[in-house]
């Protein structure tokens, strides 16, 4: 039973960067690889601030802003210098690796002896405290994003991903929308890194490696199962997919799959759900799904 709770906790914790990637890929149609760096950067900023005795809420807020700044730089490289979307994300992701090392001044930070938000709230919630806290955090995040996407600004963000050309014909400039969208996406990825670092009790320079691939796998799994036709399903799909992904990985490890083969397992899992989606499409069984489906 404890292993089930752990899988759910990990699934919900990593649902935060998965939702962030969904926002970039599905909402604004930007194939962003920056979260691989902003996830770690957010953890590094939060970790070093916690060690300096900053309040956990302040540390997490500054981690969010640090990630948001990374997202803004990615967009500026694209719209000001004409760098492709993929390359701009790769460049910023690479720079964030060095910045994270600069911030931490080491490759690993221990947070075992500092006051963290999970530890503070856990004292008030008793048994299953971490699970209760994580469920609450993800629920607040999901409700907030759904509410945002139903506002006028949210509709413009969704239109940016659906058809930026149509928006430009109506006289709406998409550049500010990309800035806001990617700032929010990478801010959430950095926030996810900060929360995961507090949960595991340390920050490691490699903790963000492959986070975008894992997030995309979760998105594919969740969308294959939910086939989102509404905004709320689009937001919930990455969280559901991430819990299933963590469950599959936990089962693979339980059956003694080598840790070195987990990347192969991740790819095969994603391909399985993609193939299932393709088969349904060929049979005409797929209903309309919202969000940018090109990437």
Image: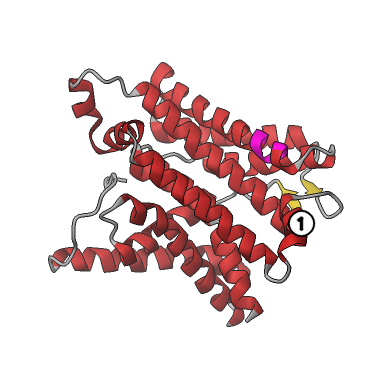
Tell me residue 53's x, y (percent). 84, 39
Looking at the rendered structure, the secondary structure element under dot 1 is helix
Name, please, the residue furthest toward the left: 284
Tell me residue 65's x, y (percent). 60, 31
Callout 1: few (<14), some (14-19), or many (20+) C-alpha neighbours within 10 Å? some
Q: Quadrant of residue 238?
A: bottom left
Q: Quadrant of residue 102?
A: top right
Which of the pair 96/198 is nearer the observer?
198
- Is residue 140 magenta-colored? no
Tell me residue 7's x, y (percent). 58, 70
Q: Is residue 191 above or below residue 96?
A: below
Q: Which residue is at a point 45% across and 49% down the rendered structure image?
A: 143
Q: What span is in magenta?
A: 58-62
Q: Which residue is at a point 43% across and 18% down the rendered structure image?
A: 81
Q: Does residue 86 appear left or right of residue 249 in this picture?
A: left
Answer yes or no: is residue 201 visible. Answer: no
The quarter in which the N terminus is drawn is bottom right
Q: Does residue 95 appear left or right of residue 279 in this picture?
A: right
Answer yes or no: is residue 121 visible. Answer: yes
Q: Give the residue at mark 1.
A: 119
Tell me residue 242's x, y (percent). 48, 62
Q: How is the image coloured?
A: secondary structure
Which of the pair 101/181 is nearer the observer?
181
Name, please, the residue furthest toward the right: 113
Q: Is residue 272 above or below residue 177?
A: below
Majority SS type along the magenta span: helix
């Amino acid at each position: 039973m404890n292993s089930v709770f752990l899988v759910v906790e990990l699934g919900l914790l990593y649902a935060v960067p998965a939702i962030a990637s969904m926002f970039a890929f599905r909402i604004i149609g930007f194939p962003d690889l920056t979260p691989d760096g902003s996830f770690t950067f957010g953890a590094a900023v939060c970790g070093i601030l916690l060690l300096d005795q900053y309040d956990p809420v302040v540390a997490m807020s500054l981690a969010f802003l640090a990630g948001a700044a990374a997202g803004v730089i990615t967009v500026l490289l694209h719209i000001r210098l004409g760098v492709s979307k993929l390359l701009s994300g790769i460049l910023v992701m690479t720079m964030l690796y060095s910045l994270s090392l600069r911030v931490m001044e080491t490759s690993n930070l221990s947070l075992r002896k500092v006051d963290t938000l999970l530890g503070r709230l856990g004292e008030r919630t008793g048994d299953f405290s971490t699970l209760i806290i994580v469920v609450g955090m993800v629920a607040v995040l999901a409700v907030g994003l759904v509410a945002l996407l139903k506002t006028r600004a949210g509709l413009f963000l969704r239109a940016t991903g659906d058809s930026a050309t149509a928006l430009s014909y109506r006289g709406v400039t998409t550049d500010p929308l990309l800035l806001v969208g990617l700032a929010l996406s990478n801010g959430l990825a950095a926030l996810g890194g900060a929360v995961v670092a507090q949960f595991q009790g340390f920050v490691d320079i490699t903790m963000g490696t492959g986070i975008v691939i894992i997030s995309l796998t979760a998105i594919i799994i969740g969308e294959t199962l939910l086939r989102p036709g509404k905004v709320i399903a689009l937001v919930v799909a990455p969280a559901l997919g991430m819990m299933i992904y963590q469950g599959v990985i936990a089962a693979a490890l339980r059956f003694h799959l080598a840790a070195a083969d987990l990347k192969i397992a991740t790819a095969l899992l994603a391909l399985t759900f993609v193939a299932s989606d393709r088969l349904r499409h060929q049979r005409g069984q797929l209903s309309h799904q919202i969000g940018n489906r090109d990437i």
